[in-house]
Image (cartoon, helix red, strand yellow):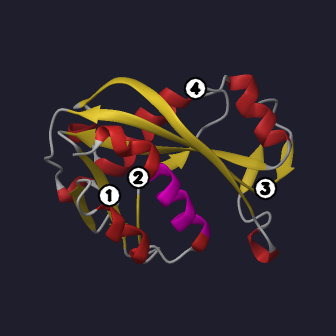
């Protein structure tokens, strides 16, 4: 897992650090659909300044999937994959980014930490989520999901992460 100083080093070169949750239960992984992005994805969010990745994971999942569901996440998050995406055009500088010391940096891309975490339940209150649909997918259907992801970089990431998730899926 990356330290807070390593994460700050990413910010210094213009990469916004992100945690991506690969939430597993009984051989299935949680996949979410967001209408605003018109895509399926793993729940994810930014790592705040001076925040450790596992703390960011729990905070972001509480925000994205609700407090009740997030209380059912357990175990030490395991880093299974990392990747970066460089922005181009108007996406460069599209969000404010600062180092831990508060120095503004031009955001040039994102750096993703894909973390596996376990859930005690499948139950998610739809009213508590930021997503329009949530499904639990096993090994038998996971190959369908990349066809439903519009952005090429995200599709590539999903395929790579799926390979790393094989030992967790039925």
Q: In this view, does 106 lie above or below 26?
A: below
Give the labeled residue for mark 1: 31
Give the labeled residue for mark 4: 52
Mark 3 Cα shell of 10 Å, populated few (<14), some (14-19), many (≥20): many
Residue occupying the point 77% across, 39% down: 10
Which secondary structure lies at badge 3? loop
The label on residue 141 is none
How much space separates mark 3 and mark 2, taking CA atoms?
A: 21 Å
Name the N-terminal-most of marks 1 and 3: 1
Residue occupying the point 78% across, 56% down: 107
- Does the magenta-highlighted stretch encompass residue 25? no
Q: Are marks 2 and 1 in contact (CB under 8 Å)?
A: no
Name the N-terminal-most of marks 2 and 1: 1
Give the labeled residue for mark 2: 43
For discs 2 and 1, the disc positioned in front in the rendered view: 1
Residue 45 horizontal/vertical position (percent) = 51, 48
Q: Can residue 135 be seen in this view?
A: yes
Which secondary structure lies at badge 2? loop
How much space separates mark 2 and mark 1, taking CA atoms?
A: 7 Å
Residue 54 horizontal/vertical position (percent) = 48, 28
Give the labeled residue for mark 3: 107
Which secondary structure lies at badge 1? strand
Name the N-terminal-most of marks 3 and 4: 4
Q: What stretch is highlighted in magenta?
A: 153-162
Mark 4 Cα shell of 10 Å, populated few (<14), some (14-19), many (≥20): some
Dominant SS of magenta comes to helix
**Residue 9 horizontal side relative to residue 122, left or right:** right
How much space separates mark 1 and mark 3, taking CA atoms?
A: 27 Å
Of the 4 image quadrants, the one containing the N terminus is: top right
């Amino acid at each position: 897992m990356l330290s807070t100083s390593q994460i700050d080093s990413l910010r210094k070169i213009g990469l916004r650090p992100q945690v991506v949750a690969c939430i597993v239960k009984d051989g299935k992984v949680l996949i979410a659909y967001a209408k605003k992005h018109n895509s399926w994805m793993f729940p994810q969010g930014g790592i705040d300044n001076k925040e450790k990745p596992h703390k960011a994971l729990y905070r972001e999942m509480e925000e994205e999937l609700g407090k009740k569901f997030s209380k059912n996440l357990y175990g030490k998050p395991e880093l299974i994959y990392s990747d970066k995406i460089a922005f181009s055009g108007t996406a460069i500088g599209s969000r404010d980014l600062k180092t831990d010391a508060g120095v503004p940096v031009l955001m040039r891309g994102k750096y993703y930490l894909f973390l596996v975490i376990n859930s005690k339940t499948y139950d998610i209150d739809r009213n508590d989520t930021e997503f329009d649909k949530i499904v639990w997918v096993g090994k038998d259907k996971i190959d369908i999901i990349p066809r439903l992801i519009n952005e090429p970089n995200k599709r590539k990431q999903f395929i790579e992460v799926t390979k790393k998730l094989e030992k967790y899926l039925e």
